Image (spheres, rainbow, N blue to C red):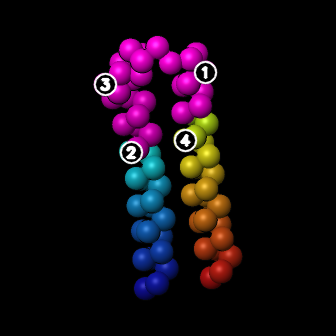
């Protein structure tokens, strides 16, 4: 079943991305960021990076669907 294998691969990739975002934003790392005296816009940069990674994942999924 090639379709089932591809779907699980897509799910795994999205799950890994979600876990990384949750670790970055909901872990004790947030306290570490606050202690760094980073500029006010640093959380926005990190969120932008997370959105960009999600965009790249979605784009690669769409290109894999078009190849099938």
Q: Is residue 41 above or below residue 50?
A: above
Magenta stretch: residue 55 in it?
no
What is the span of residues highlighted in magenta in the rendered image?
20-46
- Residue 15: percent from the left, percent from the top? 41, 53
Q: Is residue 43 above or below residue 68?
A: above
Question: How far is mark 2 from mark 1, CA to CA?
Answer: 23 Å
* Residue assigned mark 1: 41
Task: Label 2, secondary structure: give it.
Answer: helix
Question: How far is mark 3 from mark 4, CA to CA?
Answer: 18 Å
Question: How far is mark 1 from mark 3, CA to CA?
Answer: 19 Å
Task: Label 3, secondary structure: give it.
Answer: loop
Q: Are marks 3 and 2 in contact (CB under 8 Å)?
A: no
Question: How far is mark 4 from mark 1, CA to CA?
Answer: 15 Å
Q: What residue is shown at x 62% (from left), y 46% (from top)?
A: 52
Question: How far is mark 4 from mark 2, CA to CA?
Answer: 11 Å
Locate residue 46: give its quadrant. top right
Q: Compare marks 3 and 2 and give the one earlier in the sequence.
A: 2
């Amino acid at each position: 079943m090639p379709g089932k294998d591809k779907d699980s691969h897509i799910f795994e990739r999205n799950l890994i991305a979600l876990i990384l975002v949750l670790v970055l934003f909901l872990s004790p790392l947030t306290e570490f960021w606050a202690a760094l005296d980073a500029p006010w816009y640093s959380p926005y940069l990190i969120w932008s990076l997370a959105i960009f990674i999600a965009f790249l994942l979605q784009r690669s999924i769409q290109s894999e669907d078009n190849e099938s």
